[in-house]
Image (tube, rainbow, N blue to C red):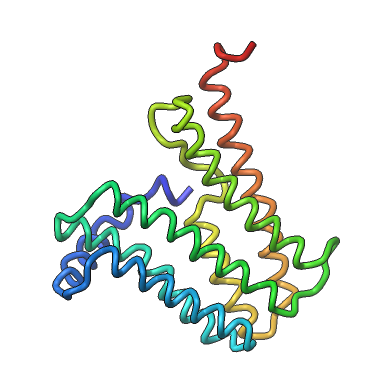
């Protein structure tokens, strides 16, 4: 849902772009920095320092917002840059979720690692359902929306690490389950949305 509300953050985006755009760092370099922070977050997750893991992941998430803002402020936007940003965003999110495999999470209905897998799978298919619909020319523009787009997933992942910092593993696992279920539900929403827009092609 947050991917449909980007206009809410236009003023903040312009401020960030103008401010950080003064630094001698290109948009693609900001994108690369997000991976560095994500990998640092993974390291701190593996070493059970969830507070520092959250801090690193938070910076990785913020830098996802920064690269595009700087690109627009410096008039350096490009299709290649947007493509790099999109792919790197998925790696950063995957690294965050992958780190949860090393956390000690309780079993709720099924083992925690299965929920991590479903969360990663759901985030991948949500993105793929959107990209594939455009690639196959089922829609004129990218499918967006749904209950659990990337913005919501990232915010909930942040919440998981905050809870883990306070030793609230059970509640953190509940939130992981919410991500796993709703991300896959969103993938199906986008899948059927593309099909419904092209009912005439169904034989």
Work out whether 64 lies above or below 144. below
From the top left corner, tell me how far across and down residue 37 is, in percent. Answer: 44, 77
From the top left corner, tell me how far across and down residue 91 is, in percent. Answer: 50, 62
Q: For the view shown, which residue lies furthest in the right direction?
A: 109
Left or right position of 161 against 62: right
Which residue is rendered at x = 61% and y = 14% of the image?
A: 202
The quadrant of the picture occupied by the C terminus is: top right
Which residue is rendered at x = 15% and y = 60% of the image?
A: 74
**Quarter of image, res 30:** bottom left
From the top left corner, tell me how far across and down residue 192 is, in percent. Answer: 60, 30
Across the whole image, how many numbered discs are drawn on residues?
A: 0
From the top left corner, tell me how far across and down residue 28 is, in percent. Answer: 29, 63
- Between 13 and 120, the residue placed more toward the observer is 120
**Quarter of image, res 193:** top right
Which residue is rendered at x = 41% and y = 53% of the image?
A: 86
**Quarter of image, res 62:** bottom left
Left or right position of 183 against 169: left
- Between 89 and 184, the residue placed more toward the observer is 89
Which residue is rendered at x = 51% and y = 86% of the image?
A: 52
């Amino acid at each position: 849902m947050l991917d449909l509300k980007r206009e809410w953050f236009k003023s903040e985006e312009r401020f960030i772009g103008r401010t950080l755009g003064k630094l001698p760092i290109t948009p693609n370099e900001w994108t690369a920095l997000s991976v560095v922070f994500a990998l640092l977050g993974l390291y701190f997750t593996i070493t059970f320092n969830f507070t520092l893991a959250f801090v690193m992941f938070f910076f990785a998430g913020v830098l996802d917002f920064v690269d595009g803002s700087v690109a627009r402020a410096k008039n350096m936007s490009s299709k290649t840059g947007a493509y790099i940003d999109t792919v790197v965003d998925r790696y950063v999110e995957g690294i965050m979720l992958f780190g949860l495999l090393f956390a000690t999470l309780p079993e709720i209905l099924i083992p925690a690692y299965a929920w991590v897998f479903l969360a990663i799978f759901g985030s991948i298919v949500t993105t793929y359902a959107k990209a594939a619909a455009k690639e196959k020319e089922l829609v004129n523009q990218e499918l967006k929306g749904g209950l659990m787009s990337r913005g919501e997933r990232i915010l909930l992942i942040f919440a998981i690490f905050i809870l883990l910092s306070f030793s609230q593993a059970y509640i953190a696992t509940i939130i992981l389950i919410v991500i796993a279920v709703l991300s896959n539900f969103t993938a199906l929403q986008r899948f059927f949305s593309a099909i419904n827009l092209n009912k005439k092609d169904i034989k």
